[in-house]
Amino acid sequence: MSPSITKSSENNTSEPQSFVIENVSLFGHTDSHLVVEDGDITLVRGSDTELSAEEIPEHAVRIDGSGLIALPGLVDIHTHLREPGREDAETIESGSRSAAAGGFTAIFAMANTTPTADTAGVVEQVWSRGKEVGLVDVHPVGAVTVGLGGEQLSEMGAMAMSKARVRVFSDDGKCVHDPVVMRRALEYVKTFDGVVAQHAQDPRLTEGSQMHEGVVSAELGLTGWPAVAEESIIARDVLLAKHVGSRVHICHVSTAGSVKILRWAKEEGIDVTAEVMPHHLLLTDESVRGYDPRFKVNPPLRTQQDVEAVRAGLADGTIDIVATDHAPHPDEDKDCEWGSAAMGMIGLETALGIVQKTMVDTGLMTWADVAFRMSHLPARIGRVEETQGLALNQGEPANITLVDPKATYTVDPAATSSRSNNSPFGGVELPGRAVATFLRGKPTYLDARFEGIFA
Amino acid sequence: MKHLLSTSDLSREDAIRILDTAEQMAATQEREIRKLPTLRGKTVVNLFFEDSTRTRISFEAAAKRLSADVINFSAKGSSVSKGESLKDTALTLQAMGADAVVIRHWASGAAERLAESGWMHGAVLNAGDGTHQHPTQALLDAYTMRKHLIGAEAGPGAHFKTATGNDLAGLTIGLVGDVLHSRVARSNVALLTTLGAKVVLVSPPTLVPVGIETWPVDVVHGLDVALERYDLDAIMMLRVQRERMSGGGNAFFPSPAEYTRLFGLDGDRMRRLPEHAIIMHPGPMNRGLEITAEAADSPRSVIVEQVSNGVAVRMASLYLLLAGEEGGE
Amino acid sequence: MTGTILGAPDISRALTRIAHEILERNGGADNLVLLGIPTRGLPLAHRLAARIAEVEPSFDADARCGSLDITMYRDDLAKHPTRNLGTTTLPSAGIDNAVVVLVDDVFHTGRTIRAALDAVKDEGRPRGVQLAVLVDRGHRELPIRADFVGKNIPTARTERVSVLLTETDGEDAVILSDGKPSGGVTA
């Protein structure tokens, strides 16, 4: 299935350019035509009849969308861009490029940079650099505590009121483990409708932890990272959120027990949202046999039972969204023994394919669910729902991701736009991928089949 | 065999072959001239990222008695402590033409990583990786058990010729102590089970790994219970790190004294073992903590003999890894 | 020329003759030690010892017979998959000042015997070393000769000589073939 592209005329004028997407499937059902002019969607209608000459803007690029699925541009609430500080691993530019290639139009850049994003100055720097690159909307996440130290609240208000308009606060990489600090943070972010995104990991229960604690860790002699270290923090934090009447977001839910606690919390009416990583939907701790550090990640790969549980949790909405936890590391931090290796894996470009493989192709989710859980809800959680995660309706900004669900391909980490190659999915076959991404009508990623059409 | 990384990689036949080879090696060590020309021209590197003089000199003696050239590379005072990675160290050894690398590393899986990363193509012999495996220790333990407990004249001082070619079927072996952090325990569980022995782990619940339920062993939580419930043919006292028995919030046990009370092997407990049972310890011992002098120095103790058996088993391992054609078997 | 070269009676006669030759050469059985080279040199050494004991009743066949494994002294270890080690068992009196008779089944390039001489040297210091073989097939590559030979068999290099013995193979025979043998040892 390779849609042919025709250009209606020569057009080398300035962006954003007009284009039409014909015969594309909206969220996997309605077959439609989409018309985009000046960065906005100006027409959406069923494709029972062809677009008339009047409907096609002058000089518009025509894209044959047959076989493709149109989704609202994806939103990743959990990305590590490493800039400032570790530009050897990733920059705002390379990370933005990788995000666009993965079908994203907005990403939230985590605060664990050097210096830490714990002041208005740093978040504004990230925000303005993201804007300058212009491939995705880069929304900085602010640190909850100064230097991620877990002790003193950072000046969240200043970050919220800065140009970066920060709404998501997280010490991700570290847990806000002190219950009093967490309580204060949850209370404080109510000032500006913010949310604390908690990296749920009891530090005492995970000292020196290397992998999921269970049958495999017992055999491999690697220090265990028990599920309870995640679950106990989630339990505490949903209770705290209830107590102070705030909302809390749980990062990278990885265990069956966490899903149970979240299900209970939602039944209680607690304002909690949660995310799951693509790798936790697909991989288990069995991958650690062989000690290949590309499988080292935090929270660790869990058991098959946990994989089933987080899939079910995502399907029934207990887990609200998918986020990538894209965590670039230079080769030298992975090309070593397990114990010395850094934790984390890149994931922006493989996220969609893994969600298709584990959730859509298995019948657990529809493409409309994918749009909801990878675009609409993350935008809402991050309070950017005015500009991102919008339905593909007339009058909305043209943030569009075209997916080819039959573009089966084998992952090659070296071919990614990220500066880093630390993907555990090298050699894995994924069923589909984003083939074009548009941010407010501007193509930010086009795969080879569309080469040159927007020249 | 291309590498010796983990006892769980060894089949029953592999294991018996190593033990049988070790028997022949041990025989040569009783001669006046103990050196053999077998590995002349081969280079064995002892790459130690963790101090262990005992293990290193055992491997060194084994390699030298087979006429291999030995290079000792210890992390202290070398480029390793200046931040050189395992990878660069491996590339260096490759460039120096190491035929085999004996590696001791603090990280579990380091030996496997070295063997399978493509950084070098010599044989890799795991001399202890983190809390994972220490295969030659388990092999020397199995060798010692077979020598004393298998065959018509089994019992302390049994003539070992009858053991040749046999496994350890029918034996019940007790491993006492810190299983959680013990590569010796992990290696022994896999090997002894492969060789048909029954393994009983005697350990406080705090020092048993979560996930142990899939191991083919019995677990009991007190030495007296174990002595009551099982006729142990051999009892192996694992080394206990004192700091794990005290140190407030990080301790796995209330105190060293309590550990000794519940898990230590003293004369009284020793006398409750079957008549023929042997007492083992991988060393170095904490006398007075996991074992008393009375037990350690009794005629049933084979602890000193384990050391010399270690050289024979390591000679056998080096022989089987290095003597044949490269990539052979 | 291929086929069974020696049958059981031939082998028996050859061993009896060699036993007598050993006694004759050494003026009796005093200080005599027979060391068989595994695998098939070992039963041959025991048979020779038994025959010597028939002639010299004071000769304790079991006590004066041993096994000498030469695997770790071979010069071709790196050219083959790793070999299993055989057993070396010496008479309890050792071999110092003894006359050691090495016993092997097939004498070919001489490399096995070269290795055996090295192995003997590491075990002790005999007064002399002699060599007894069941078959000498020629093609020596080293300046080594046998003292006692059961039968000289002219062979081509490509041919194979298989020695079968009751103790290891269920029957006694020496077979010459040009392909891979169905059983027994080749040299």
Image (cartoon, grey):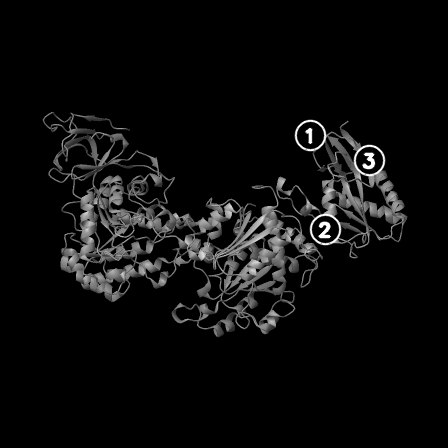
- Under mark 1, the amino acid is Gly
Q: Residues within 10 Å of mark 2 (few under 14, many from 20)?
A: some
Q: Nearer the viewer, mark 1 or mark 2?
A: 2
Quadrant of residue A45 in the image? top left
- Under mark 3, the amino acid is Lys
Using the image as rendered, state which of residue A425 and residue A16 is in the foreground: A16
Earlier along the polypeptide chain: callout 2 or callout 3?
Answer: 2
Instruction: Give the labeled residue for mark 1.
Output: C179
Q: Which chain contains the residue that carries disc 2? A: C
Q: Does C53 sit left or right of A446 as displayed? A: right
Most distant residue in the left direction: A54
Q: Nearer the viewer, mark 1 or mark 3?
A: 3
Using the image as rendered, state which of residue A77 and residue A447 is in the foreground: A447
Callout 2 and callout 3 share a chain:
yes
CA–CA distance between discs 1 and 3?
Answer: 22 Å
Instruction: Give the labeled residue for mark 3.
Output: C151
Using the image as rendered, state which of residue B81 and residue B139 is in the foreground: B81
Q: Is residue B33 above or below residue C40?
A: below
Q: Secondary structure at mark 2?
A: loop
Q: Is residue A139 above or below residue A55?
A: below
- Under mark 2, the amino acid is Thr
Instruction: Give the labeled residue for mark 2.
Output: C88
Q: Secondary structure at mark 1?
A: loop
Earlier along the polypeptide chain: callout 1 or callout 2?
Answer: 2
The answer to whether mark 1 and mark 2 are in CB contact below 8 A is no
CA–CA distance between discs 2 and 3?
Answer: 27 Å
